[in-house]
Amino acid sequence: MEFTYADSIHVAAAPQAVYDVVSDVTRTGEWSPICARCEWDEGDGPHVGAHFTGFNVKPDREWETRSEVVAAEPGRTFRWAVSGGRVIWGFEIAPDGEGSRLTETWEFPQVGRDFFRERFGDRADEEIAIRTADARSGIPETLAAIKRLIEA
C-alpha cells in the first residue's frame, strides 16, 4: 500500500491568489469532503508554527484534529502536520500558463501507522486502508472544489 498521494489541477488564477485561499484554513469546509471546518488558535494564522483545530465528519463518525503549520511560503507552499506528524497534508502552487498548477499532497508516515496499530490493534490495517482510500478520493474532490471556488 502506498502511504503518499498527490494530484494536481490547473486553476485560472495567479499563484498568490490561490495561496491566499488554500492557506485560509477557516475556509476548508468550503472544499473538503470530510473536514467540515477549521479554526485557528486565537491570534494564529497561516505561518510556520501556527496551530488550528479541524472538525471532521463522515457518516459513521465525527472527530477533531490538531494541526501545526510546517510550511508557509506565500504563493508557493502551505503544509500542515496533523497530531504531531501522524499525517501531513499540503498544497504546492506553481505558475502554469495564465494561471497556476495547484497540487494537494498527503503523507501517512510510519509514526502515524504505528499510532494506528497501537490504537486499533487487529483492526489497524482496515483503518489504515480506510484513511488511505479517503485521501485518494478526497484529494481530487478537494482540488475540483477549490478550482470552482476560485474561478467563480
Image: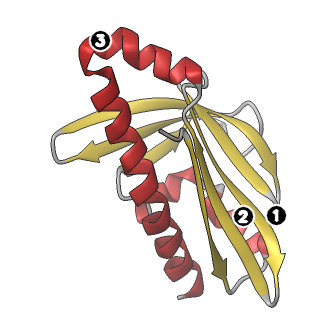
Marks 3 and 1 in Cβ contact (< 8 Å) = no
Could you tell whether 120 is left or right of 78 in the image? Answer: left
Establish if 10 lies above or below 104: below
Note whether residue 45 is visible. no
The x and y percentages for residue 58 are 24, 46
Establish if 93 lies above or below 48: below
Could you tell whether 37 is left or right of 92 in the image? Answer: left
Q: Which residue is mark 1?
A: 75
Establish if 127 lies above or below 33: above
Q: Which residue is mark 2?
A: 19
Q: Which residue is mark 3?
A: 121
Cα–Cα span, label 3 and label 1: 41 Å
Q: Residues within 10 Å of mark 1 (few under 14, many from 20)?
A: some
Report helix, strand or loop for mark 2.
Answer: helix
How many numbered tags mark residues here?
A: 3
Cα–Cα span, label 2 and label 1: 5 Å
Cα–Cα span, label 3 and label 2: 39 Å
Residue at the spot 25% in from the left edge and 37% down from the top edge: 62
Residue type pointed to by label 1 = Gly
The x and y percentages for residue 90 are 64, 49
Residue at the spot 81% in from the left edge and 69% down from the top edge: 94
Marks 2 and 1 in Cβ contact (< 8 Å) = yes
Establish if 124 lies above or below 151: above
